[in-house]
Amino acid sequence: MVKKKSLLIFVLAVLTAAVIFGLFFQFWLDKTKESYLLIDTQPPQTGHFPSPLVATPTLLPPTPTPTLTLEELAAIRKRQFEAVNQRYGPCRYVPVLMYHHVMEAEDAATIGASYLNVPPAVFRAQMDYLWQKGYHVIGLDEMVEGIRNDSLPTKPVVLTFDDGYRDFYDYVYPLLREKGIKATLFVISQFVGGERYLVWAQIKEMVDSGLVLPGNHTLNHPYLTKLTDFQIKDQIFSANNILREHLGRSVHFFAYPYGGINASVEQALKEGSFQGAAVTTNQAPQCLGLPYRFSRIRIGATSLANYGL
Ligand SMILES: [Zn+2]
């Protein structure tokens, strides 16, 4: 009798444990799905705080090779879009391409930046590809406007360049002029004028041309998620002030260094009335209900066809 009773208790305990585990697993699954859709899943990297003016700020893993087939990408897109548009819409698929350096391969190798580089000839081929495929290159501001008013051109695409390297002036800007296309340049304000970085006169000239939209990429490229609220605001608002002082205009877009984002950072951007901020995830719909989570595709030295474009 006693034996039977303890067996019964044992079975009940096992069942209860299984139910609790199941609930947790479902919860975890939901969280994982959600973060796959919307949140930059790249883990923060530790221990590297570049010093102003000399350091290469972007510590990212090597340029990834796309791993999904185009059919798989299309299926994921469709599923994502329905769910996300309902919750955070209006949403539209607008590929926002993320670049860092555009310089000759040998020069990039010399400074250890090959993994952040797209050689000029490849970059030109990528821009030619966009043209041939009927894409319309628009500014990040035009993307927001276009989603809001439902006035996007067919096949819109946005170009963004992080960190403000000097090679942007040498290789990208001439091509923007030649083709009459726009790009957003996310500037690390305290690094401007440093070795390998643009100088203010170059940035001003490019912004004044109307082809380059300036964006804020903090004062000195820290992991914002490791800072206090006060330091986060300093990194964002002081950088805005410096940009306004040198460029004579306000800046309304932001890019998170290393993709580091949390609630405090988003709150600060909200208080600063930013129109949008770009993360470093792969392609997801751009939603006006999530203006501080505009997704980007990190582009390497290969055909844009490999990124679903
Ligand atoms: Zn950066």
Image (cartoon, rainbow, N blue to C red):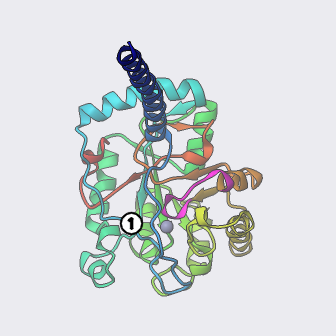
Q: Position of residue 267 (x, y in %)?
A: 71, 51
In this view of the protein, which residue sits in the foreground, 31 or 286? 31
Most distant residue in the top direction: 1
- Name the residue carrying label 1: 60
Q: Which residue: 58% across, 27% down?
A: 87
Q: Which residue: 40% across, 47% down?
A: 282
**Callout 1: SS:** loop
Most distant residue in the front direction: 1
In this view of the protein, which residue sits in the foreground, 85 or 178? 85
Q: Which residues are magenta?
A: 256-264
Q: Which residue: 68% across, 65% down?
A: 232
Q: Position of residue 106 (x, y in %)?
A: 24, 80
Does 68 sit left or right of 166 as displayed? Answer: left
Residue 124 visible in the picture? yes
Where is the C terminus found, in terms of image quarters? top left
Amino acid type for the residue under numbered disc 1: Leu
In the picture, residue 216 is in which quadrant? Answer: bottom right
* As drawn, 28 above or below 214: above
Does 241 sit left or right of 137 as displayed? Answer: right
* As drawn, 5 above or below 77: above
Q: Residues within 10 Å of mark 1 (few under 14, many from 20)?
A: few
Does 230 sit left or right of 295 as displayed? Answer: right
Residue 216 visible in the picture? no
Q: Residue 161: within the magenta? A: no
Where is the N terminus found, in terms of image quarters? top left
In the picture, residue 151 is in which quadrant? Answer: top right
Q: Is mark 1 within 8 Å of ligand 1?
A: no
* As drawn, 219 above or below 304: below
Q: Position of residue 68 (x, y in %)?
A: 25, 41
In the picture, residue 219 is in which quadrant? Answer: bottom right
